[in-house]
């Protein structure tokens, strides 16, 4: 069985290649890329916050509408019952 030996030469070679490539990138463009990434992250966070707020507001509005409809139906039922009682009292 062959034993693979770890050679520091490849590690140093990789580091040198990475360093050479990193030096080719202009600093201004790199900083602009980082700024753009930061702004995109802030935008996504703001979108998530407003999405949650929108969901909360629409849920509350729906809850108010359902409560309003239930209260109106209950009131209408009481009025109908009172009308029936009044009609039964008049006709008796």
Image (cartoon, rainbow, N blue to C red):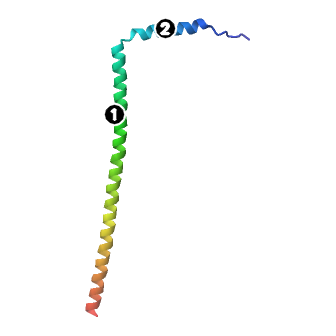
Tell me the CA gap for discs 1 and 2.
35 Å
Count residues near mark 1 (Cα–Cα under 10 Å), then give few for <14, some for 14-19, many for 20+.
few
Answer above or below: position of 86 versus 53: below
Answer above or below: position of 88 versus 43: below
Residue 52, quarter of picture: top left
Seen at 37% across and 22% down, the residue is 34
Answer above or below: position of 84 versus 29: below
Residue 54 is situated, as x and y percent measured from the top left of the image, at: 33, 47
Q: Which quadrant: the C terminus?
A: bottom left
Q: Residue furthest left?
A: 90
Q: Which mark is residue 43?
A: 1
Marks 1 and 2, the one that precedes in the sequence: 2
Q: Judging from the image, what secondary structure is the residue with disc 1 in?
A: helix
Q: Which quadrant: the N terminus?
A: top right
Q: Which residue is mark 2?
A: 17
Residue 31 is situated, as x and y percent measured from the top left of the image, at: 35, 18
Q: Nearer the viewer, residue 82 or 31?
A: 31
């Amino acid at each position: 069985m062959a034993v693979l030996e770890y050679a520091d030469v490849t590690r140093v070679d990789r580091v040198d290649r990475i360093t050479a490539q990193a030096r080719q990138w202009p600093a201004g463009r790199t900083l602009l890329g980082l700024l753009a990434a930061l702004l995109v992250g802030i935008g996504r966070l703001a979108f998530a916050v407003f999405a949650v707020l929108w969901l909360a507001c629409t849920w509350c509005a729906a809850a108010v509408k359902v409560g309003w409809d239930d209260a109106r139906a209950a009131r209408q039922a009481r009025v109908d019952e009172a009308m029936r009682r009044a009609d039964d009292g008049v006709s008796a």
